[in-house]
Structure formats: C-alpha cells, structure tokens
Image (tube, rainbow, N blue to C red):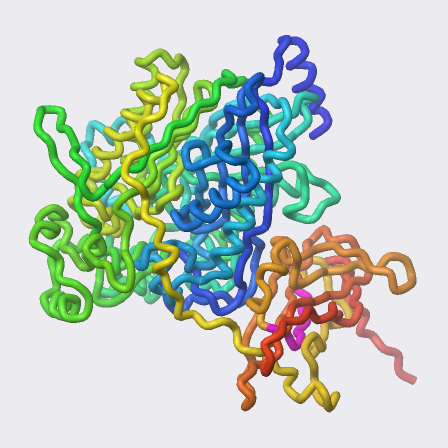
Amino acid sequence: MKAISCVFAFILGVALGQDPNFIVGVGIEDVTGPAADVNMMGYAHPGQTSRGIHTRLYSRAFIFCEVGNSDKCEVFVVVDFAMGATAINIGVFERLKTLYGSMYTEKNVAICGTHTHSGPAGYLQYFVFDATSQGFVHDAYDNLVEGIFQSIRIAHENRAPSFVYHSTGELLDANINRSPYAYEANPANERARYTHDVDKVMTVLKILGEDMSDRGLISFFPVHPVSMNNTNRLLSSDNKGYASYIIEMEKNPGTFHGQGDFVAAFANTNQGDVSPNLEGAKCLDTGEDCDRITSTCNGRTALCVGVGPGKDMFESTKIIGERQANKAMELYNSAGHLLDGTVGFVHQHVDMTDFDVELDGGGTVKTCKGAFGYSFAAGATDGAGFFPFTQSETETMPYLEVLRDALLKEPSAELVACQAPKPVLLPIGEMHTPWEWAPSIIDTQMLRLGEFVIIVVPAEFSTMAGRRLRETITDYLENDGLSGAAAEIVGLSNTYSDYVVTEEEYQTQRYEAASTIFGPNTLRAYQQQYTYLSEKLMEGSQPTQGPPIPNLLAEMGTTLADPEGDEDDVNIVTGLGPKIGELIMDTDAKYRQGGVAMATFIAGNPRNDVFRMRDDTFLKVQRRVGLGNNWNDVYTDADFCTRFLWDRASTSRRGGSVSHATVVWDIPLDQTLGDYRLAHKGYRKDSVKGDIFCYEESYSSAFEVVSASYTEDRTSSSS
C-alpha cells in the first residue's frame, strides 16, 4: 500500500509539473526525563509521582523554509509534555544560538505541548506550576531542553526540497465535551451553526520528499490526552503519543521507535473542554451520570470521573490513539491540496494583566491580574480535585478565605472586582513569594505556510472560544487577500497561561472558566491581539517585541532531593545476598500470544542518571536467533506493549534504598512464535560516595511464546 501511494503521488506530481513548495526538515528526539519520584504535570495531585515508563516521550520538530531562500525558516515543535514553558524556551534558544546565531529565535520557533498529563513536572518557571513537584526539577528540565534542541538540530541537518499538502476531514468518535453546561451558555443562534459541541475536524499536513518519499505528518485535532487517568504512575505519551507511535512504526519498518526518519506529530488545538472519555462523567458509587452543573456525586467531586471507551486506561489510550492515527493516515493518503510556498511568522510579547480591549460599540475594558476561582480546585471530570470544592461555584467560602488570607495572600479589591463573577480563591497574579506565582507577560505568535496559518496560543481554549478566534483570523486573512485562507489553533505553547473561555462560559464558573486566569475579557483580548498579528503577517513585517518576559531561572529553587544511594541489600564486598541487576522473580516457561510475561530485578533508582538514559532503554524483549545463545532485540521501553515498573522496596540502615524493577511485556496476539527473554539495565548510585555506575544488562530465563490457541496436554497414562 505504501509503495502504491508513493508511486501515485510521484506520477501525480510529474503529471502536474509541480516543483517542491518548501524546504523541509524533520527531527525526533527523546525527552523522557525522570521515571521515579517526580510529580507528573497535569492533574496537580502531589501523590501522583512517577514509578516507571509506559511509553517514552519525544520532541518532534519540523522546519519549513522558502524554496530559494533557505534562511527564511520557521520551526514548529510538538513535544510529549503537558505544555510549553518560558523556562524551556529560554534554555532551547540559548542552545540554538550557539549553533545557528539568529536563525532560530522566539520569533520563528513555536514549542507546543501535546498536553499529556503523564510526563514529569517541575520544568516551568512560575511557582503555581511547580508547587506539586516540590519546586524546580533540574533533571526534568535539562532533558526537555536537550531533547527539544536536538530534535531541531536533526531537522535542520536534513532539510531538503519537499512537497507539503493540506487536508481536512471529520473524526466523529474520539472526543466529547466535558462541560456541556458551560457550552450551552453560549448564544443559541451561535450554537445552531455547529452540529457538535466539540470540533470534529482534523487537519493534516502531509510532507513528501522531492522523490515523493514519505517524510512526515502533522495532525491538528482537539482532545485532552487524559486517557491515562490520575491514578497512573507511569510516564506516558497518552493517546496522542500512541497515534504518533502507530504511524511512525508503520512508516519506519525495521527500526525501534524514535529512531526512524519519518516523523508524525499530533498537535492539540482548542481542547480546553474536550475529553477522550467517551462515556462521559459517571458516579463511582452508583454508576449514574454525575450532577450536570456541579460534576458531583452526593456532593463529592472525587466520585465523579470521566470513563471509557476502554475497559481500563491502557485500552482507552489505545482506542483514542488508534482513531486519531487512522483518520490522520486516511487524510494523509488522500491529501491533494499543495500549499503555496510562502513562509511567514510574527511574534510579540503582551502583558495580559493590563490589556485594553476595544469594544465594538466603543469604549474599552481590561484584562485582570491572574487569579484562580474556587472551581479550579474542584478539578475537571477527567481528573477530580478536592473536597469541599465543586464546579460552577460562584460564591466564596468565608472560612477558606480566612485561612487563605492568613497563610497566603488576600486578593485586592481591584482584583476581586475585575475577576467577577469569579470568586477568587488564589490571587496568583499578586503572589510573589517564594518567586512569581503566575505569568503576566506571555508570547503571542503566528506561523504561515502558504494559505495555511497556525495560530500559536499560550493557553487552552474552549471549543467555542477557539471557534471565535479561528473565525476572526480567517475572516481577516480572507479580507486582506489571502484566498482560501485556513487557520488552525495550536494551544499549550510557549508561555503557558491556563485556560480561555467565552464571556458567556465565564459566567458559569465551571473548571475551565475558573482557570481563565486573566478574567472575563481574555478571549476578546486575544481576538484583538491576533488580528493585529494577522495584519503584520500579511504585511510581511514584525511588530515591536513588547515587554520582555522575565527569566526567573536564577530565582527558582528546588526542594526535591536527588535520589539517595542504592543498596545491594547486603554489602557488595561480602558477595552475599542479591545485587543490583540480579533477577529475583523469573518468568514462566511458556506464554500464549496475548499473554503477559514479567520478571523482576533488583534495580538502581531510575533518576540516578536520567541524562544518559535518554535515547536508551531500561528494558528489552529479546528473541532467540537459531539454536544457540544469540538474541535479537525486539522491543524496548518505547513500545506500547511493554511497561517498566519501578518501586522502592525498602530503605537500609546505611541510608541507601533497595529498588525493584519489573519488566512487563503484553505479548501481541500476532507475535512471532519462538523463544524470548526479558532484560533490564540502568545506573546505580553508591550510597556512601555518591558515584554513579552503569550496571550490566540482566536477563530472565528463556521462555517460549506459543500460539494463542495452544492447549497443554495434561493427560497421563496409568499402568
């Protein structure tokens, strides 16, 4: 099928006399980070710390340059992390400057998150985002900066003439609205223009080489990567990462994941109120629907949870990922609209706490200093928050106000009035200890590929907020002469600043509205700002830079200690007892296709050397070749069918700890029959000197994978 598709594309290109419309580079690099003891970013649950790897995390970079002007380029990066961050941009741009000077800067580089909630936290520079991770986590930050930089470097080095096509189509069974009560607050005549209460259109960019070979794919589709719920303790790229995995493994046969030339990114759009949990929010105690307004069950948010479509979070991740991947490949294979080869980009810093919004009827209103409402603490149905908070809360709780004022900060009267009807729980824009709690100055940015424009936004837009912004920009571009203009929002980019909802949705104070930190006029401010950027984009000029974004890296602190030393359980010198790397629970002798093989080893803490484990693997599944002791690697911890589970078994009296690593292999139903074994490797830290050493690969016993229909003969003869 792939060969036929390439031949067809080549014949079509020759027949139409088309030349490549862009110079394109693609790159992918590991950004996995610490797989132990680090809080995960997204659900904001302090107890949700990492305990291993479900899938590795990657940065996927795409560079687009004009044909004949290879210095006029823009960079679009999609990263398997929760959201973009100023601190990350600072680190990446410093690295880029050392190699490329002023070629790649904040003006033409957009770094966006898929929004997986199962990646390491602690890499953002504002305190409110680092609170649950106990501060700044350097090994999480360093791996992200290095991996993103390397993905851009790889893309730069393989830039080549390419064809870029644009295609769109509907995907109907991969997302639902998790806040329909808020959505229905929008005007009835506006809602009547749309069939669904979430966007169902997927946009795909198809990238072919000059010889019509497959090079890359970018999908744009709104859905939260929260199929892996807040009980998950494994690093995971979630449903969007699995969609990338499916296509990259298909397009890069014979390679391990993350090592092939074809790169498939699944960017997020206006997913603020969009869930993958297709069965909706259900009560854990009764199985009934949750209260529609407050998202509670018997008054408790913790009992109201979004569920489905799978029997567990792993199956749900697979289902939603497969549906995105299948639609993306359908659009990729049918894409026929070749984009005009123009590259354009604009960027400006904006102070979103003091933005003058011009009203249609005259006069102005302002945005506000940042604040979270009470319903922020209730969480969303994809990840419930804490008692006694509920969604749609428009009243304050006096006893909580007393505690907040005494322990944190009393909001100013000006802030309370500006944010109304939001009851202010946390006045984060007025909180500066131990360092700045929230952003005020943020990035706004647009990228152009011919008639296709990417609206790069630093927040999570609700469905209707995204529709309004997209329509505002598309209409402006069309009226300014860009025929056939198509615009797509990409959120969670650059300086993350929480949510954006419509003014009508803001009145309901659901979770998304309570998290719209700059107040009720935020959307209109963005519509005005991105209209201004569109004007500059069409002029081919850059706006003024705007106020500088602060660099807080020097001010930030961390209270998350480095891993303690590892113990061999008994002194290494004596040679007694189990040692790090030693097998302590072996596999069975035989497994059917579709079964689960596992083995457990004494292990080092996975945080011991996160940097050297980037682009490596904590586990392998190996298959015997021939009749001897020769083994080929089949799977790593980057594969969806494996899991690396880590746990601290105990702490010794010498101050070190004993860790266990369990290698799990969910054997595919079509797995080749034969002999296999499981392997584990890692780094150990001396509990006395602190020195770090790699320990050798350790193996389970060999086991046989037999047919799924295999039945063991249990009959025996008697004399």
Number of numbered labels in the structure image: 0
* Residue depicted at 19% across the width and 37% down the height: 355
Residue 626 placement (x, y as % from top left): 90, 58
* Residue depicted at 47% across the width and 30% down the height: 203
State the image quarter where residue 702 is shown. bottom right
**In which quadrant is the C terminus drawn?**
bottom right
Q: Is residue 321 visible?
A: no
Instruction: Name the residue nearer the viewer: 367 or 246.
Output: 367
* Residue depicted at 42% across the width and 31% down the height: 201
Instruction: Name the residue nearer the viewer: 220 or 669.
Output: 220
* Residue depicted at 54% across the width and 25% down the height: 71
Instruction: Name the residue nearer the viewer: 240 or 87.
Output: 87
Instruction: Name the residue nearer the viewer: 180 or 714.
Output: 180
Is residue 339 shown above or below 249?
above
On screen, residue 324 versus residue 589, left or right, reads left
Question: Is-magenta flag for residue 441?
Answer: no
On screen, residue 462 versus residue 689, left or right, reads left
Residue 296 placement (x, y as % from top left): 25, 60
| Magenta stretch in the rendered image | 596-604
**In which quadrant is the N terminus drawn?**
top right
Is residue 688 shown above or below 441?
below
Residue 160 placement (x, y as % from top left): 64, 26
Give the overall secondary structure of the magenta segment.
Answer: strand
Question: Is-magenta flag for residue 599?
Answer: yes
Residue 526 placement (x, y as % from top left): 26, 34
Q: Is residue 102 visible?
A: yes
